[in-house]
Image (spheres, coloured by chain):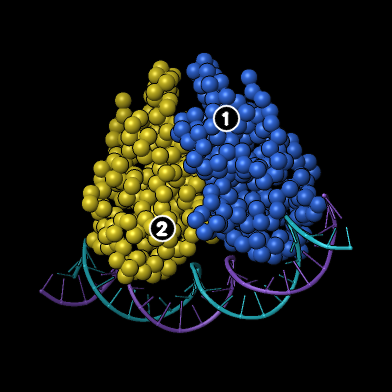
Chain colours: A yellow, B blue, C cyan, D purple
Amino acid sequence: MSDVREVPAGHDVIREGDRPENVHVMLEGFACRYKMLPDGGRQIMAWLAPGDFCDLHIAILGHMDHGISALSDTRIAFVPQAEIDRLTRDAAGALNRAFWWSTLVDEGILREWLVGMGRRSADKQLAHLFCELLFRLRSVEVAKNGSFHFPITQDELADTLGISAVHVNRTLQQLRAEGLITLENKRLTVLDEARLTAFAEFDPNYLHLNKRTRS
Amino acid sequence: MSDVREVPAGHDVIREGDRPENVHVMLEGFACRYKMLPDGGRQIMAWLAPGDFCDLHIAILGHMDHGISALSDTRIAFVPQAEIDRLTRDAAGALNRAFWWSTLVDEGILREWLVGMGRRSADKQLAHLFCELLFRLRSVEVAKNGSFHFPITQDELADTLGISAVHVNRTLQQLRAEGLITLENKRLTVLDEARLTAFAEFDPNYLHLNKRTRS
DNA sequence: CGCCGCCTTGACCACCATCAAGTGGAGTGG
DNA sequence: CCACTCCACTTGATGGTGGTCAAGGCGGCG
């Protein structure tokens, strides 16, 4: 029904404009949605974690209006689109719901990122992102004891937050100095979750996690 | 099947946390998605134009993770959720598709806004927003000759772009001085569409308009 | 007439971008 | 085993975009 492929870090899963005949599901590692600008700038718009759909879109929209790229080495399931069509038609109830879940939660996350970029200072924005990640990864059981594998470079963080890599570096050091996190050897540890979430004014509401696990 | 209500400018259509039993569809005027921050700051995350669904979400997600507020006097259709359920169950094909369209295009717009906030200077971001509006409103035939009713205050623009009202003001003046637009008496006119889109590096691709009108 | 919301303008300054140089570890080839 | 390279991270200096504070103009409306 679907095959699984390895996509190494830095490689595209799909490119803007593509009309792929597969729908992709993350199995392992991190990927991101992004757009390029004429001046060569890149803006990352979402991180995709294990379990996430990459591109349910194209079943409806026909072509991608953004690209998806692996941030770390990944394993990704390639599901033929016809399969998706069949599934949605047959089990119109439950599966349809699951697909909706996926894209609506995506949209919720996107909205929260927008708030971050628009209205949060760099330090709070970064802290907020770490909180979000902690909650998301815990819900799929890849984070334990507030610690998880984090292979994202500072450049990629910069493209995610819409700030410069230099400033990411300084902001990270600040969070470390505050005793909120550590980040070394591609491993992120949240040292004081209570203080971190308070600092970031983080409210996991928008992730709709309680329901997601139920569904 | 549904009733139509007037929601005056500045009033909420739904609030964050609500579990409304209606789904809302814009008929006239502008509304916006927004979130409030602890410090009282507001971030607008989308503008809703005539024809847009406000909150298909709640049929699935159960509660709103953001609020919706009227930016101008509006007319809005209130459709009982049961109606939506029935429609999606019966006409599983076409209607389902239409709903997907709506939310996926929403998501595309959100992504583009994120790019704007992250990587575009205030003037290009504003120009880009005006281009987007022109295209969206033209497709529902409320813009004629590059001109349309625009009742949004500079404060609301500021909350949309994630910048300050003062800076919106200065940026508007700059666009006027360049001969790109006029904005007076709540009417926005694009004087030189070619130059405006070029300046904003605007590509309507993400709006998926061609397909939308076909569907 | 007087208030109120919205727009406008000026002065000052902070956050963050940009440029530039340097450190350090991992991998590669001689 | 030691250069050598490459990449990610780090640090410093400088400046610009845009924030904040404050005051004033201007039109609409009660």
Judge left or right: residue A33 versus residue B137.
left
**Picture quarter with the C terminus of chain B:** top right
Q: Residue at x 52, y 42 (%)?
A: B16
Judging from the image, mark 2 belongs to the subunit labelled A
Q: Name the amino acid, label 1.
A: Val
Q: Quadrant of residue B99?
A: top right
Residue position marked by numbered label 1 in the rendering: B23
Question: Horizontal and vertical percent for residue B214?
Answer: 63, 28
**Picture quarter with the N terminus of chain B:** top right
Disc 2 with disc 1 on a shared chain: no
Residue sticking out furthest to the top: B90
Question: Horizontal and vertical percent for residue A26?
Answer: 33, 40
In space, the residues marked 2 and 1 are separated at their CA atoms by: 32 Å
- Circle 2 SS class: helix
Q: Residue at x 36, y 53 (%)?
A: A131
Residue A200 is labelled as: 2
Q: Where is B172 relative to C24, above or below?
A: above
Crowd band around label 1 with a 10 angstrom C-alpha radius: few (<14), some (14–19), many (20+): many
Q: Name the amino acid, label 2.
A: Ala
Q: Residue at x 42, y 44 (%)?
A: A205
Q: Residue at x 39, y 37 (%)?
A: A53
- Circle 1 SS class: strand
